Amino acid sequence: MDKQLPTIQDNPIVNEYLSMLFNQNKEKDFKDTKEMIDYITGMEVQLSDVLKELQGIKEVLNQIQNPTTKMRLNEVFTKTETFINDGKNKLSNIKDEILYSMKECLHDFKQKGKMGVIKVIHISHFKESIEGLKKSLFYSLKQIQKVSSTIDSMTFQFRKSKTGIKNIGRLLMGKPIQSNSNDINNLNIMQKSCRNMFFGLEKLAMRTTKFLHRIDDFGKSSVKKDIKLITYPPKYKQKQNIVKGQSR
């Protein structure tokens, strides 16, 4: 059984940063950051499962006997792998950006201590990067659909060829029929893995879309909080009281 690689939530910088927020009563920042970490962690785990399916497909592909089929499938799966790896790289970059920002905030806190203003990461800054990840996921989904269509077409052709003219001629000459049963079985295995990959990528895309909406909610909450924190200068308050007195 493959050992699960460490996720972002296992990183000591993340734990230290969350502890700082919690200890300094930064409840909203703690909650929002924790939600983002959970999102990234879930993405890492699910994307790892998709890549395992792809690795399994490549192993089955090596067993295909028909050279033309093997070459054509190798082309479409190479393109699929390129799209998925693009998403993986974008997720990795987002993770690195988050860790770097956390590290900077922790350094600033250690330098200034409790007397200074606590610097926190702004989740909205990562929105553009996450939108880029979403695009890669949808491109991957479209590519998987193309792969599935290609496999369906090949499977149909193989089954049709069983009763084709070539095999009739071989029978008349007393030669055994050329069977594509092994390749058909392998195509069926790959098709099943493609479906698993599609559902996995679909979950990733839906999860990302949902989190992008959450980022918008984070921003709205911050604006409301900022409005409540507005305080008027003493002279303005005094003027307001005079106006109220005159109106009476």
Image: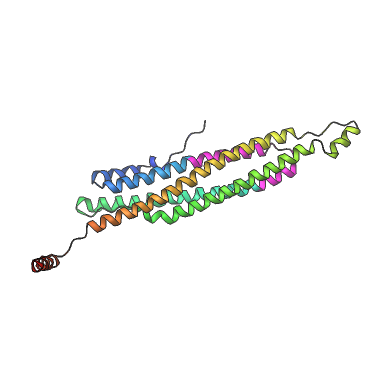
Q: Position of residue 54 (x, y in %)?
A: 58, 41
Q: Is residue 59 visible?
A: no
Q: Nearer the viewer, residue 182 or 242?
A: 242
Q: Nearer the viewer, residue 21 or 207?
A: 207
Question: Which quadrant of the rendered structure holds the C terminus?
Answer: bottom left
Q: Decide if residue 179 is on the left or right side of residue 195.
A: right
Residue 55: within the magenta?
Answer: yes
Q: Residue furthest right?
A: 173
Residue 34: within the magenta?
Answer: no
Query: Where does the magenta region start and end?
Result: 46-75
Task: Name the residue located 53 percent from the left edge and 44 percent from the top edge.
Answer: 201
Q: Position of residue 6 (x, y in %)?
A: 43, 39
- Reply above or below: 199 against 225: above
Task: Name the residue located 19 percent from the left edge and 53 percent from the top edge.
Answer: 115
Q: Main secondary structure of the magenta part?
A: helix
Callout count: 0
Residue 188, by quadrant, is top right
Residue 207, by quadrant, is top left
Q: Position of residue 155 (x, y in %)?
A: 71, 39
- Reply above or below: 129 against 64: below
Q: Decide if residue 176 is on the left or right side of residue 120.
A: right
Q: Is residue 112 visible?
A: yes
Q: Nearer the viewer, residue 242 or 142?
A: 242
